[in-house]
Amino acid sequence: MLRLQGTLPFVRQEWRFLLFGMLLAFWSGPGQTYVISVIGGDIRSDFNLSNGEFGTIYTVATLVCAAILWKAGPLVDRLPLKSFVVKVSLLMVAATMAFGFVQWPITLFFGIIAIRFMGQGMMTHIALTSMARRYEAERGRAVAVAGLGFPLGQALFPPLIVLALGFVDWRLVWPAMGILAAFTLLPVEPFLIRHTSHQDGAGATVLQAADEDAKHWTRAEMLRDKKFYFLVPTAMAPAAIVTGLFFHQVYLVEMKGWSFEFWSFSFIVFAFASLFGGVISGFLVDMYRARRLVPYVLLPMSLGILLFAYAHTQTYALLVMFFLGIGSGGTNPVLSSLWPEIYGTRHLGAIRSVATVVMVFGSALGPVFMGWALDASISLEAIIIASVIITFISAFLAKLAFFIK
């Protein structure tokens, strides 16, 4: 109850910066798999690509994004947020608009690099890193509130794109998204970024002065820490599995005999469940700390993918999306709060960029391995059972991580 009473004044006072995080999370959408995959069938048809071929292009492009993000991620620590985020947003708008003009597989490849790096990579990285850095006592709730932009995008983009595709070619959808992003994001960013006195984590020096014993790890130190490698599978698994599922959703939904229109509108359930999962997870992080929650964050996702494999009636899509949404929403506050909780905030941009690279790497592996499996006629049930085994191994390793010295 005390946490709830403290949350409303926090949101009223910090609404500007929280809205900034939400907008960045929302407009990461054009670079996220849940948007690209909705148009995946049209792209494969236009470029005459199989599931495996399109998955391979997508994977290699995403791996390139991960390599670039390794270098670009620490810029959040070194550059003024206001000028940096405006430049990133401009590039995101340009990449989104340009994607509608790709003509050959090579330009498709570079187009995917651009929208994935600017969207899933930098927009997401800046949104979550800035929340985790500027807030300490309310870190979990700040990440959860800013993270509401993700389910909002998941609720709006897929059904609206499906509706638009009934009237216009898929190539016109991308410039339209770019124009909307330019008008709703760029004019308000400078106003929303302003500091307030409540932002107790606004600088590492403030935290260091408050706690002389606090250690702020460098990225090199973190990479020598054994705990990190036990936590990596938990960061990678949801990105790989859910991205693989959503990337091939057109084919998988057709294979199950479900209506893709019904499936696309079930993203609204996914979005509301993600919102609910994120808010609850944010409260739990502030109450119990992220390290105690991280072994359990993959369980709802496991239930969702099991239902997808074994449910036969398409109305079960709503329940599938509910569990996937709870898992997706709950993961962000836990993992985003985990890294500053363990490794401090002075080098948070560099440290979180590694975690983001891990997540991007996972999202690169999912589509290609699932595409190869589908091309090899491996059953959906077998793919899902393998995925569930991976989630349970990841959860066990996360639990084990904090017993390691």
Image (spheres, rainbow, N blue to C red):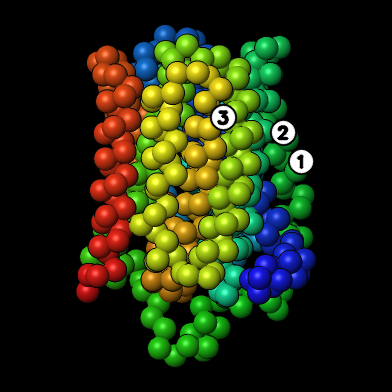
Whether residue 62 is visible: no
> What residue is rendered at 75% in x and 43% in y?
184
Residue 385: x and y in percent read 29, 32
- Disc 3 marks a residue whose amino acid type is Leu
Please name whichever residue, 31 or 384, is drawn nearer the observer in this view of the structure.
Answer: 384
For label 1, the SS is: helix
Q: Which mark is residue 318?
A: 3
- Disc 1 marks a residue whose amino acid type is Phe
Distance, label 2 to label 1, CA atoms, is 6 Å
What residue sits right under mark 2 in the picture?
179
Whether residue 270 is visible: yes
Classed neighbour count for the residue bearing mark 1: other residues with Cα under 10 Å, few (<14), some (14–19), many (≥20): few
- Disc 2 marks a residue whose amino acid type is Ile
Residue 365: x and y in percent read 32, 35
For label 2, the SS is: helix
For label 3, the SS is: helix
Please name whichever residue, 52 or 84, is drawn nearer the observer in this view of the structure.
Answer: 52
Pointers 2 and 1 in contact (C-beta within 8 Å): yes
Residue 250: x and y in percent read 48, 18
Distance, label 1 to label 3, CA atoms, is 33 Å
Distance, label 3 to label 2, CA atoms, is 32 Å
Q: Earlier in the sequence, mark 1 or mark 3?
A: 1
Which of the 4 image quadrants contains residue 17? bottom right
Quarter that holds the C terminus: bottom left
Q: Which mark is residue 183?
A: 1
> What residue is rendered at 31% in x and 36% in y?
387
Residue 371 in the figure: left or right of residue 290: left
Q: Residue 138, relative to residue 76: is it above or below? A: below
Q: Residue 361, relative to residue 347: is it above or below? A: above
